[in-house]
Amino acid sequence: MAIYARAFIVSFAVVTFAVLTQNAQCGQSIDSKSNPSEPKSVVVFATRAISKGTVIVDADLRESVINSRGFRESDIPGRNSITGRRSRYAMTKGQIILERDLLPSHAKPKNAEQSKHSANFVQAKRAIRAGSIIARSDLTEGSVKTTDSSTWVRNENQVVGMQAKFDIVAGQLLTTDVLIAKSAPFKAR
């Protein structure tokens, strides 16, 4: 009985969080006319279902920037802070990952007061299939305060014409690991 009660409470908390954040599942189309003055936060979401107790690898994670009006800022500064940790609960594809979803880390905690800096980002407006050539109409740009943006693509011009290595969901930040470089034109002899 206690297991069912705990499962209900966890499910209720996830559903409540999803309703309050409006964008708790990554993959919705992005409104390109969004107000730039709206508060934004970086969130990390699962790219696939993750079983309870699984060690989370970088390929399991993607980042997104969402309108954060109506909920407190995520306690996860970026995907690098999750990689190598174990999931406390089973997670669904697209679920935003919070600290409470992870088992405690045995490593020394990183300085929680890391200084945030303003970073530019490129975000997918709509889903982009693996192997597709990325067009300017697929993208939107923005800026957000964050502690780590080292793998982010900073400008649309850097990715237009590149090929998606993996499926990219609407709202996902474009990072260097999800893109295949433009190939040089073939020269015949």
Image (spheres, rainbow, N blue to C red):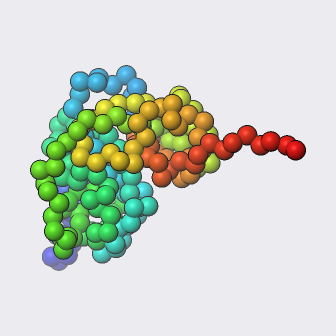
Residue 48 spot, x, y in % from top left: 43, 61
Which residue is nearer to you in this view: 122 or 171? Answer: 122
Residue 145 appears in which quarter of the rendering?
top left
Q: Quadrant of the C terminus?
A: top right
Residue 58 spot, x, y in % from top left: 39, 61
Inspect this view and state whether residue 17 appears.
no
Residue 120 spot, x, y in % from top left: 34, 34
Which residue is nearer to you in this view: 137 or 183? Answer: 183
Q: Residue at x 40, y 26 (%)?
A: 32
Inspect this view and state whether residue 166 appears.
yes
Single out the residue that lies furthest toward the front.
Answer: 189
Q: Quadrant of the N terminus?
A: bottom left
Task: Count up the numbered dots.
Answer: 0
Q: Residue at x 15, y 64 (%)?
A: 109
Residue 117 appears in which quarter of the rendering?
top left
Q: Residue at x 32, y 64 (%)?
A: 83
Residue 162 appears in which quarter of the rendering?
top right
Left or right? Give the position of 64 relative to 153. left
Residue 172 spot, x, y in % from top left: 41, 44
Residue 8 sits above or below residue 115 on the image = below
Residue 26 sits above or below residue 155 on the image = below
Single out the residue that lies furthest toward the right.
Answer: 189
Q: Residue at x 14, y 56 (%)?
A: 111
Left or right? Give the position of 76 relative to 161. left
